[in-house]
Image (spheres, grey):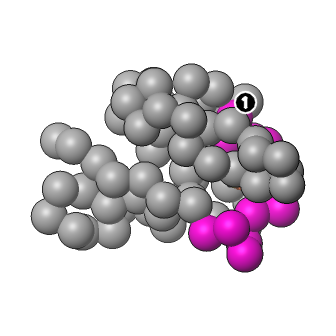
Amino acid sequence: MSIKISVDREKCISAATCIAIAPETFELDGEGKAVIKNPTGNDEATIIEAAKSCPTQAIIITDENGKQLVP
Ligand code: SF4
């Protein structure tokens, strides 16, 4: 499976939980918002776990068919 990751900047509150779980995939930019550093930086299960951990559901994950997996 290949997944597509995006971050809703409006929803991101800089909690950084995603970075704690998947530090090779997400990082905070200069505005303190999560951005994708490397979409394959961590394995997919870890990236999905990181997305689910976001307190504001700012991370959206879809599969290769466009089906939304998270949130
Ligand atoms: S866990 Fe959610 S709110 Fe926190 S930095 Fe990541 S995307 Fe932003």
Image quarter of the N terminus: top left
**Residue stretch rendered in magenta on the structure:** 8-19
Residue at the (22%, 68%) spot, across then down: 66
Q: Is residue 56 left or right of 23 when viewed as pictured?
A: right
Residue 43 figure quarter: top left
Q: Is residue 54 left or right of 59 when viewed as pictured?
A: right
Query: Measured from the top left, where is residue 51 in percent x and y?
Result: 55, 50
Residue at the (24%, 56%) spot, across then down: 63
Q: Main secondary structure of the magenta part?
A: loop
Q: In this figure, which residue is indicated by the disc labeled 1?
A: 20
Q: Is residue 70 visible?
A: yes
Badge count: 1
Query: Measured from the top left, where is residue 48 in percent x and y?
Result: 45, 44
**Which element is circle 1 on?**
helix
Query: Where is 6 relative to 15, above or below?
Result: below
Whether residue 68 appears in magenta in the rendering, the answer is no
Residue at the (17%, 56%) spot, across then down: 64
- Please, what is the three-letter code of the amino acid marked with disc 1? Ala
Query: Where is 45 relative to 11, above or below?
Result: above
Which is nearer the eye, 64 or 33?
Answer: 33
Query: Measured from the top left, where is residue 9 in percent x and y?
Result: 68, 67
Query: Where is 29 relative to 54, above or below?
Result: above
From this viewpoint, which residue is outermost toward the front? Answer: 30
Q: Is residue 57 visible?
A: no
Query: Where is 49 relative to 63, above or below?
Result: above
Whether residue 13 appears in magenta in the rendering, the answer is yes
Q: Residues within 10 Å of mark 1 (few under 14, many from 20)?
A: few
Which is nearer the eye, 54 or 35?
Answer: 35
Residue at the (76%, 42%) spot, across then down: 28
Residue 18 figure quarter: top right
